[in-house]
Image (cartoon, rainbow, N blue to C red):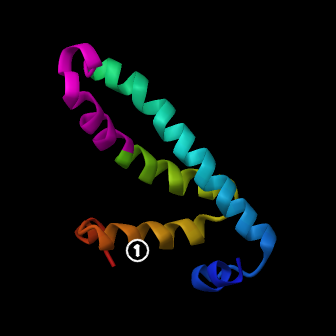
Amino acid sequence: MNKLKQRWGVTSNYQLTIIFIVFAITGSASAWLSKPLCVWIGITKETLGWGYYPLRFLLVFPIYQVLLVLIGFIFGQFKFFWTFEKKMLRRIGLGFLLKE
């Protein structure tokens, strides 16, 4: 745990626990929200077959990114998650979306 705290610049076990809770809530919420969104758009297993899961994953990804920062803000960890988000977007080649 100390290596993770050092890598993320976290100072306490309490802060690390809050960060883990935010990751858990965000993952669950993004998966939960993607299902009704898929139905609303018209993406179902019956209409797309094998293509349903790749498209649903593509929907979950941006939902997750937005929720991560939003839920992090609610839990008082906006600075950590905004830095985390910028780093993640740069690593996957979407850094152009961020203005510095």
Residue 76 can be seen in this image? no
Look at mark 1 in the image and give the residue it sits on. Answer: 87
Choose top left, top right, bottom left or bottom right for residue 7.
bottom right
Q: Dot 1 surroundings within 10 Å: few (below 14), some, or many (20 or more)?
A: few
Identify the residue at image location x=79%, y=72%. 13
Secondary structure, mark 1, is: helix
Choose top left, top right, bottom left or bottom right for residue 58.
top left
Choose top left, top right, bottom left or bottom right for residue 39.
top left
User: Magenta stretch: residue 9 in it?
Assistant: no
Quadrant in which the N terminus appears: bottom right
**What kind of secondary structure does the magenta stretch mostly adopt?**
helix
In the rendered view, tell whether residue 28 sits above or below residue 83: above
Quadrant in which the C terminus appears: bottom left
In the displayed structure image, the side of residue 29 where residue 9 appears, left or right: right
Identify the residue at image location x=25%, y=38%. 54
Across and down, in percent, residue 61 comes to 36, 48
Across and down, in percent, residue 33 comes to 47, 31
- As drawn, the residue found furthest toward the top would be 46
Identify the residue at image location x=21%, y=21%. 49
In the rendered view, tell whether residue 49 sits above or below residue 86: above
Query: In the rendered picture of this protein, how many numbered marks are placed on residues?
Result: 1
Residue 29 can be seen in this image? yes
Find the magenta span and give its range: 42-60
Identify the residue at image location x=49%, y=73%. 83
Of residue 59 and residue 57, the one placed in the foreground of this image is 57
Amino acid on which disc 1 is placed: Lys
In the displayed structure image, the side of residue 31 where residue 38 appears, left or right: left
In the rendered view, tell whether residue 96 sits above or below residue 55: below
In the displayed structure image, the side of residue 10 where residue 51 appears, left or right: left
